[in-house]
C-alpha cells in the first residue's frame, strides 16, 4: 500500500492508494490523513479527492493511526466515558478550585523514530513542567505516555482535568476504542486512571495558539532535539 497527496476542500491530504497510484476505496470512501504522523485516520469520498501531483509515497510516510469519527474530525470528542472537548478560548489556563489541571503532548521525529513528551501540571499555586526523552517509539506511544505521566504525578484524591490533542489517546483510554497496538501500555494507563479516579481527558486542537498546549509541545520537541530529559521542574518566574 502507498499514499498520494490529494486536494480536499482546498487543503492537501495524504490519501491511501495502491502501488500504481490508484486510490483504494471501500464503499466509495478513501482513508486519508491530514498530517502524516499525528495518529489520526479519517475517510473522504473518492469523488472529492483531486491529485496534487503524480508522486506515489511509501507506506511509512504515514504512521500507525486509529480511525477518528466524523465528529472528532471537526475538533470534538463528544460522548464516551468522560471525554470532553475544548475549542479555542474554552481551554483553561489555570485549574479550578480544588482541582488539578494538566496539558500534555508527545513529539516524534519520524514515526517510529526518536520521541519525547512534554507536560504542564498545575494544582493550586504550584506549576511543574516535564520534558522527557523516551528513545525510539511512535507518536501514539509518546501521546499515551504523556497522559500517563501527568496522571502519575497528579495529587492523589484531587480531580484532574487533562488536555491533550491526541484523539487516539482519548479514544483508547476513555471512549472504549479497542487498542490494536500498544496494548500493554494502554492497559497500564487505564489502571492508573482507575486508581487515581476523577480524571477527565479533554480534546484540544493542537497548534492552535492555546498557550499551555503550545508549551507542552515545546517541552516535547525540546526533549527529542536534545535527546535528554529534564524531569518535573518548577519553571522560573
Image (spheres, rainbow, N blue to C red):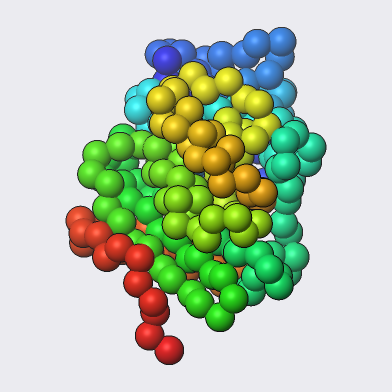
- Residue 82, image x and y in percent? 72, 42
| Residue 144 vs residue 55, the one in the foreground | 144
| Residue lying at the far left of the rendered structure | 227
Q: How many marks?
A: 0
Establish if 151 lies above or below 42: below
* 203 vs 20: above or below: below
Which x, y percent locates residue 209? 59, 69
**134 to the left or right of 37:** left
Residue found 62% across the figure and 25% down from its top: 177
Residue located farthest toward the right when viewing the structure as drawn: 79
Question: Which quadrant is home to the C terminus?
Answer: bottom left
Camera-nearest residue between 100 and 230: 100
- List the single residue furthest toward the front: 157
Who's the residue at 62% across and 13% down the image? 25
Q: Horizontal and vertical percent for residue 144?
A: 46, 41
The single residue placed furthest to the top in the displayed view is 27
- Of residues 122 and 175, the one drawn nearer to the viewer in this rendering: 122
Residue name at image x 48 percent, y 66 percent: 120
Work out whether 75 lies above or below 159: above
Residue 64 appears in the figure: no
Q: Quadrant of the N terminus?
A: top left
**Where's residue 123, x and y in %?**
56, 70
Residue 55 is drawn in which quadrant? top left
Residue that appears at 46% across and 13% down:
18
Q: Is residue 151 visible?
A: yes
When asked about the image quadrant of residue 23, the answer is top right
197 shown above or below 27:
below
Amino acid at each position: 500500500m502507498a499514499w498520494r497527496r490529494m486536494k480536499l476542500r482546498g487543503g492537501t491530504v495524504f490519501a491511501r492508494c495502491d502501488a500504481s497510484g490508484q486510490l483504494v476505496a471501500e464503499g466509495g470512501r478513501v482513508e486519508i490523513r491530514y498530517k502524516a504522523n499525528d495518529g489520526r485516520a479519517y475517510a473522504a469520498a473518492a469523488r472529492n479527492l483531486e491529485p496534487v501531483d503524480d508522486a506515489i509515497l511509501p507506506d511509512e510516510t504515514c504512521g500507525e493511526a486509529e480511525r477518528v469519527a466524523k465528529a472528532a474530525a471537526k475538533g470534538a470528542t463528544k460522548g464516551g466515558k468522560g471525554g470532553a472537548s475544548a475549542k479555542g478560548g474554552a481551554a483553561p489556563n489555570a485549574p479550578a478550585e480544588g482541582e488539578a489541571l494538566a496539558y500534555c503532548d508527545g513529539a516524534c521525529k519520524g514515526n517510529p523514530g526518536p520521541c519525547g513528551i512534554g507536560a504542564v501540571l498545575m494544582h493550586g499555586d504550584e506549576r511543574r513542567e516535564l520534558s522527557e526523552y523516551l528513545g525510539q517509539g511512535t507518536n501514539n506511544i509518546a501521546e499515551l505516555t504523556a497522559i500517563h505521566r501527568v496522571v502519575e504525578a497528579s495529587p492523589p484524591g484531587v480531580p484532574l482535568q487533562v488536555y491533550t490533542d491526541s484523539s487516539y489517546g482519548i479514544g483508547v483510554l476513555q471512549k472504549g476504542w479497542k487498542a490494536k497496538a500498544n496494548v500493554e501500555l494502554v492497559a497500564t494507563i487505564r489502571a492508573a486512571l482507575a486508581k487515581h479516579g476523577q480524571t477527565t481527558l479533554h480534546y484540544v486542537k493542537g497548534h492552535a495558539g492555546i498557550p499551555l498546549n503550545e508549551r507542552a509541545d515545546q517541552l516535547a520537541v525540546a526533549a527529542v532535539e536534545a535527546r535528554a530529559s529534564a524531569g518535573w521542574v518548577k519553571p522560573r518566574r
